Image: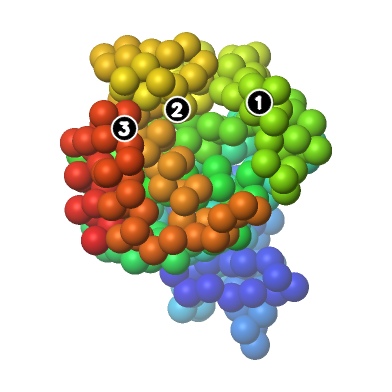
Amino acid sequence: MKQIETKKIKYFSIQKLSFQIGDKLSFNLYIAKENRAQLFFHAGDTLSMKDIQELQKFSKVYINFNDLYAYKKYMHQKKIPSRQIYQEVDLGSITETLKSYMRHIFTNSADSITLKKLEPWVSHLTTVILQENTKIKDLLHLITKDYETCTHSLNVSIYAAILGKEIGMPKTELKKLVLSAMLLDIGKTQIDEKILYKKEALSSHEFKIIKMHATMGYKIAKNAGIVDKKILSGIHHHHERLDGSGYPNGFKNEHVSQFARIIGICDTYAAMSSNRVHKESKSAFEILSEMKRELKGKLDGELIQHFVKVLT
């Protein structure tokens, strides 16, 4: 999809072959003039023969990126495969949109409305990641090194998607995993920023408060309408460790779910590879070596091996 840009709004070229006379479109169509988008067809109108004939005069037709979900729904109704719809969707635009939603969550509210808006973009991200032509290096370029709670959540979800794809997780499960990873820290929205962003070492009491974010996040997600047990387990138990040394429940071995294990590894790696208040980032080799050495018996060794393989 060729991208054009008008006042920082992104547009992407789409297929014209699926359009037929009588189709009622739920998205606007644009044409490019002097590398700028010009509205050609209004959402809600019905395509006429004249519209179809006019469309054929243009080599490229575009949609606003915000209409991607509506376009995807239209194409699915036409029974066009997802891989065809997303063939060249810009990953950067998807992650920027997700980042803006996460910022809203962390600065305003993790309400059911925002979480509902987040889900289709998680689906877009997962679909693109699963495509054969999506390379790991392209995904790693999306990782933000400077630590922020909202960008950390996005980083963890990208790493989780990479690991989930590597172990052959089905698309439906991978979507759930990415959403769970995206929401791993929503409980921190309930914690005083003076503690959350404190530059000095935390007191034992302050650390206890920080540790409450896992249970708080679980409750927020559940109250917002998320009922899937796997998604909730990833949010609630990503700090559990296989030897029982984690929190909030001190779960061991088989009681730590697969989602919690994956997100726990990705959360640890993402934090160690970011520039944080107390520590600067380390190289991938240093981090993975340290994780294998220091966290042996705590994190899932087999999953770490897969993670090492895919990152190296």
Type of amino acid at the residue the image marks with label 2: His
Q: Residues within 10 Å of mark 1 (few under 14, many from 20)?
A: few
Q: Tell me if residue 290 comes above or below residue 241 in the rendering.
A: below
Q: Tell me if residue 185 comes above or below residue 62 in the rendering.
A: above
Q: Which mark is residue 238?
A: 2
Position of residue 154 in the picture relative to residue 286 (left or right)? right
Secondary structure of residue under mark 1: helix
Residue 55 visible: no
- Marks 3 and 1, how far apart at CA: 24 Å
Q: Quadrant of residue 187?
A: top right
The C terminus lies in which quarter of the figure?
bottom left
Which callout, 3 or 2, points to the residue nearer the camera?
Answer: 3
Q: Number of callouts in the render?
A: 3
Q: Residues within 10 Å of mark 2 (few under 14, many from 20)?
A: many
Secondary structure of residue under mark 2: loop
Residue behind mark 3: 299
Which callout, 2 or 1, points to the residue nearer the camera?
Answer: 1
Residue behind mark 1: 204
Q: Residues within 10 Å of mark 3 (few under 14, many from 20)?
A: many
Q: Earlier in the sequence, mark 3 or mark 1?
A: 1
Residue 273 visible: yes
Which residue is at 20% across, 44% downward?
A: 305
177, 48: nearer the viewer = 177
Type of amino acid at the residue the image marks with label 3: Leu
Which residue is at 65% across, 53% downward?
A: 277
The N terminus lies in which quarter of the figure?
bottom left
Where does residue 93 sit, x and y in percent of width and height?
55, 60
Where does residue 280 sit, x and y in percent of width and height?
54, 60
Q: Earlier in the sequence, mark 2 or mark 1?
A: 1
Q: Which mark is residue 74?
A: none
- Marks 3 and 2, how far apart at CA: 10 Å
Where does residue 289 sit, x and y in percent of width and height?
28, 52
